Amino acid sequence: MRDWRFTLHLQDVLTSEQLDTLFVLDRFCDGRTNLVRGPDTAEFWCTIEAETLTDAIADALSRFEEFPGVLVRSVELDEMALEDNGMATPAVVPVPPPLEAVPPVA
């Protein structure tokens, strides 16, 4: 078993009623799925332990069966997730190093 990291993008932003429902659903309160909201977006950052990435995504998606009216639009693995998920190979472009802060010019 290993931890898989990915993002689930929702079809629509959550309504206040949906947020109220979310906060009482045990399957969303275990720290494996974290809601991230923007002005026009809603997504869940997921870290799910499973044998395969497919199993991890299926686990995360199954949580939405108890969350009526909320639809997942897409699943994303960002460039960092390839390395974090142990999926880096010679065919995967390495993640660039973080940018260093440049001191302001006086």
Image (tube, rainbow, N blue to C red):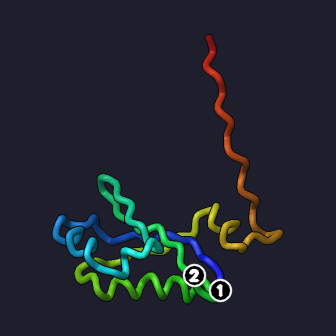
Local SS, label 2: strand
Residue 29 falls in image quadrant: bottom left
Q: Residue furthest top?
A: 106
Placement of the N terminus among the 4 image quadrants? bottom right
Callout 2 crowding tier (Cα within 10 Å): few <14, some 14–19, many ≥20: some
Residue 62 falls in image quadrant: bottom left
Q: Disc 2 marks which amino acid?
A: Glu
Callout 1 crowding tier (Cα within 10 Å): few <14, some 14–19, many ≥20: few
Residue at screen point 54% across, 84% down: 56
Q: Disc 1 marks which amino acid?
A: Met
Placement of the C terminus among the 4 image quadrants? top right
Q: Earlier in the sequence, mark 1 or mark 2?
A: 1
Residue at screen point 47% across, 67% down: 45
Asked if residue 13 lies left or right of residue 59, the reply is: left
Front in this rendered view, residue 49 or 82: 49
Front in this rendered view, residue 30 or 70: 30
Label 1 to label 2: alpha-carbon separation: 6 Å
- The residue tagged 1 is 1
Q: Position of residue 65 (x, y in %)?
A: 32, 88
Q: Position of residue 97 (x, y in %)?
A: 72, 48
Q: Position of residue 70 (x, y in %)?
A: 28, 77
Residue at screen point 76% across, 59% down: 94
Circles 1, 2 touching at the beta carbon (< 8 Å) = yes
Asked if residue 54 lies left or right of residue 65, the reply is: right
Q: Position of residue 100 (x, y in %)?
A: 68, 36
Local SS, label 1: loop
Asked if residue 36 lies left or right of residue 68, the reply is: right
Q: Which mark is residue 105?
A: none
- The residue tagged 2 is 49
